[in-house]
Amino acid sequence: MRNSTLCYIESDGKYLMLHRVKKENDVNRDKWIGIGGGFEENESPEDCIRREMYEETGLRPENLKLRSVITFVIEGGECEQMFLFKCNRFTGNLTECEEGTLEWIRKEDIYALDLWEGDRLFLRKIENDCGFFTMKLVYDSHGTLVSAEENGVKIL
């Protein structure tokens, strides 16, 4: 199982979103996602998201808050466990990202973007500050969400 991180960076009622348009053969190609990536050797979840946030945006988080652990099951593919963070204080200047285009998007406009269906589920949870939760998202080989669990209870 692969480990990764994702962070929704928030400022002035907006999230910093990454439109994944620069890499070929990218599972996230053309999707809008938060900031994050895979663990490097000996990294904690916090180490990983700090590094990824700086590499992708030029920003350094000042108040990371772990909101969830999400387990992705992809039929015929590698499973992934993702540590989901939120951050609303940071330093630095926004830089260009090698993986796509960074854009501040108003929270109310997020759901009109091309998002993964599971991302819509956990985004709603972190917007409502509902506390820590776990989620399991199962996708078929075509990228369609086929089932979802929250805190071990089936929701889809």
Image: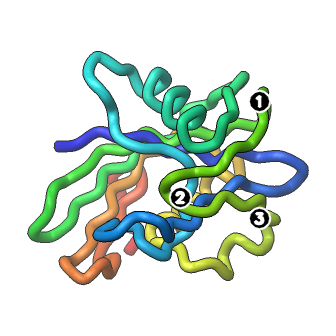
Residue name at image x 40 percent, y 64 percent? 23
Q: Residue furthest left?
A: 76
Q: Position of residue 144 (x, y in %)?
A: 32, 81
Residue name at image x 33 percent, y 56 percent? 136
Earlier sequence position, callout 3 versus callout 2: 3
Q: Is residue 129 left or right of residue 138?
A: right
Q: Is residue 98 left or right of residue 42?
A: right
Residue name at image x 54 percent, y 36 percent? 55
Residue type indicated by callout 2: Phe
Residue name at image x 21 percent, y 65 percent? 74
Relative to residue 47, is residue 118 depicted above or below? Answer: below
Which of discs 3 and 2 lies nearer the camera? The answer is 3
> How far apart in space, not on screen, are marks 3 and 2 (Cα)?
17 Å
Please give the label number shown on residue 145. Answer: none
Q: Mark 1 near mark 2, Cβ–Cβ under 8 Å?
A: no
Earlier sequence position, callout 3 versus callout 1: 1
Which residue position holds label 1? 92
* Viewer-nearest residue: 121 or 150: 121
Q: Mark 3 near mark 1, Cβ–Cβ under 8 Å?
A: no
> How far apart in space, not on screen, are marks 1 and 2 (Cα)?
27 Å
Label 1 crowding class (10 Å Cα cut-off): few <14, some 14-19, many 20+?
A: few
Please give the label number shown on residue 105. Answer: 3
Please give the label number shown on residue 122. Answer: 2
Q: Quadrant of the C terminus?
A: bottom left
Label 3 crowding class (10 Å Cα cut-off): few <14, some 14-19, many 20+?
A: some
Relative to residue 126, is residue 67 depicted above or below? Answer: above
Relative to residue 112, is residue 5 depicted above or below? Answer: above
Residue type indicated by callout 3: Ile
Earlier sequence position, callout 1 versus callout 2: 1
Q: Position of residue 11 (x, y in %)?
A: 83, 46
What colour scheme governs how the chains and residues are painted in the rendered image of this protein?
Answer: rainbow
